[in-house]
Image (cartoon, rainbow, N blue to C red):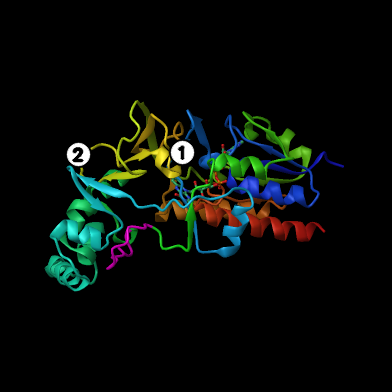
Amino acid sequence: EKKYDYLIVGAGLFGSVFAHEATKAGKKCLVIDKRDHKGGNIYCENVNGINVHKYGAHIFHTSNKEIWEYVNQFAEFNRYTNSPVANYYGEMYNLPFNMNTFYQLWKVKTPEEAKKKINEQVGQHAVLNPANLEEQALSLVGEDIYNKLIKGYTEKQWGRSAKDLPAFIIKRLPLRFTFDNNYFDDKYQGIPVGGYNVIIDKMLEGTEVLLNTDFFQRKDYFTGMAEKVVYTGMIDQYFDYCHGKLEYRSLKFEHEHLDTPNYQGNAVVNYTDSETPFTRIIEHKHFEFGTQHDTIITREYPNEWTDQEEPYYPINDTRNSEVYLLYKDKAAQETNVIFGGRLAEYKYYDMHHVIAHALKKVRTELKQAE
Ligand code: FAD
């Protein structure tokens, strides 16, 4: 008889949803995390009442009603709507590309005028088989939007010229012919009142959590404590990198406390020129309509990934996808380990995807355990 039913590696969203449902069903769980806090990448640090998104701006959005209702049991959500603004050498444009943007670019006032202008802009760039990201973007939106709003940002993000990036990175570039700055098309959107920690704390209420605890420091010991392991860390690390390392893009965040109540008038401002070294500035208080006398901003710099950096975005090129499949095969043979979440599945997941996925896995698991 083992002490726990589940040892859950990772107190991020996946691990927390799993722990919550399993505990509710009467299972005994132990959650461990190597960081000094719960929440994984959605963790917020409260500084003078401002919830600082420590691992990048997080906006909850979904069209899935069940998931929306699920998260709403853990926190109330405010009416925050993501409507980023782009700064191109001091010229300001609304995003996503919509009638406001087209007016700012060309003073066009009607959808018909805007469509005509975009057709002119695409002109001879309309190609059937774009050879790279630059050709792809030009063929979709034409010169001004590409040069002012896409090129610099994308090149900074990937650390490479748009001519050296594959066309498939940009499949579509939605153009909206209404005066609507809402970035997401989803039905539901918002920020949890009090920040994301409220959700995680509530999910993990009644579950044992050990922080500052790395699974790999005592892998056999932890594995031996429970009937099953739920693993949400990096999949290649679990198998001791036997098929080589999976690669990531990383980010660097530079936080600054400023003695002014409102630095940029918006939560997210993208810097789309190629000279500014960062891609965006986040002003955290605006996610929650903060009225503090001071503010905290974060400059976000794209960064090469090394073992010392946080792995943020998986790189889904051919080499990494093939290596991942080798690990996935190995994972399928580990009958007592459940792999889940963005690192164990080497996949970019939004929060609503992770919740849906964790719910599916834990429900299947609990049914089998009945
Ligand atoms: P994580 O949150 O990474 O949790 C994994 C946990 O496992 C971590 O806490 C880690 O410390 C722990 N761990 C790993 N290895 C070990 C080990 N060996 N021992 C112990 N613990 C270990 N989603 C949205 O819906 N909206 C957004 O606006 C949004 N913005 C994003 C912005 C950025 C910059 C990034 C990178 C992601 C964004 N996301 C957003 C996605 C969101 O962050 C993820 O969907 C979610 O955090 C994934 O949860 P997870 O539990 O899978 O992983």
Residue 187 to residue 238: above or below: below
Mark 1: few, some, or many residues within 10 Å (few <14, many ≥20)?
some
Question: For the magenta stretch, what is the residue range?
Answer: 170-183
Instruction: Tell me: 204 left or right of 242.
Output: right
Q: Which type of secondary structure does the marked residue at label 1 adopt? A: loop
Residue 278 falls inside the magenta stretch: no
Horizontal placement of 73 versus 323: left or right?
right
Q: Label for residue 55?
A: 1
Q: Quadrant of residue 180?
A: bottom left
**Front-most of 204 and 178?**
178
> Is the distance from the Cβ of mark 2 to the nearest ligand 1 atom less than 8 Å?
no
* In-front residue for pair 341/113: 113
Tell me where residue 210 appears, x and y as whole percent: 68, 32
Disc 2: which residue: 275
Q: Secondary structure at mark 2?
A: loop
Q: Main secondary structure of the magenta part?
A: loop
- Label 2 vs label 1: CA separation? 24 Å
Q: Amino acid at mark 1?
A: Tyr
